[in-house]
Image: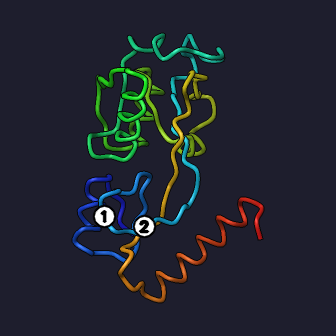
Amino acid sequence: MNIANRSEVIRRLQDNLDDLYVFSQPPEQLDILAIPLADNPLVVIAPARHPLAGQCGIKWEALAAEPFISREVGSGTRHAIEEHFARFGWRCSPRMTIESNEAIKESVAAGLGISIVSRHTLLHTAPGNLVELDVQQFPIPNRWYLVRWRTKCPSPVAETFARFVREADLLSKGNT
């Protein structure tokens, strides 16, 4: 398994280096098969002591002056954030760009700003350090996909894994 940002994974896919790839936003211009893996909502996080922690229905405009920490250009999260902001006419002007969700969480917990990350990343955070803010127009709907070339014959291991993913997705939705 190789972990990289979206642009690097697209490069690996175009170079046909691997059997399977995971994307939150599969490239639309390529002839690929994208199998849904799991929901991956993107949420606004802040330090637990943030003045807006615990408030409901916060408008993004109330956070616009906050230092914003973001993933790097080329990451799937940054791509989703930029699309979401464009939809609402908001500006995406990160004060700091960091290439690691863990480093982003540590920076937010230290009070250096707010961020938008996958809700799943909060599951692995020490309780009490970070909070998800209840911001209008959030979470950003997002999903992870297992991707491969439509015309590529998968290896037996890749096919077994893809079948497991499809079956697990059906089971998680209560389908049999």
Question: 33 or 158, which is in the foreground?
Answer: 33
Q: How is the image coloured?
A: rainbow
Question: Marks 2 and 1, how far apart in space?
Answer: 11 Å
Percent from the top left, x then y, of residue 138? 55, 29
Question: 22 or 130, which is in the foreground?
Answer: 22
Horizontal relation, residue 123 to residue 106: left or right: right
Which residue is drawn at the image coordinates 44% and 33% (left, top)?
106
In the picture of the structure, the residue carrying the numbered disc 1 is 30
In primary-sequence order, the first of circles 2 and 1 is 1
- Of the two numbered discs 2 and 1 in the rendering, the one whose residue sits closer to the viewer: 1
Q: For the C terminus, which image quadrant?
A: bottom right
Q: How many marks?
A: 2
Percent from the top left, x then y, of residue 32? 38, 68
Does 82 sit above or below residue 15? above
Res 26 → quadrant:
bottom left
Res 36 → quadrant:
bottom right
The residue type indicated by label 2 comes to Val
Which residue is drawn at the image coordinates 35% and 41% (left, top)?
79
Does 52 sit above or below residue 94? above
Percent from the top left, x then y, of residue 121? 53, 44
Which residue is drawn at the image coordinates 58% and 70% (left, top)?
165
Question: Is the Cβ of the residue at disc 2 closer than 8 Å to that at disc 1?
Answer: no
In the picture of the structure, the residue carrying the numbered disc 2 is 147
Res 168 → quadrant:
bottom right
Horizontal relation, residue 175 to residue 132: left or right: right
Which residue is drawn at the image coordinates 43% and 62% (left, top)?
22
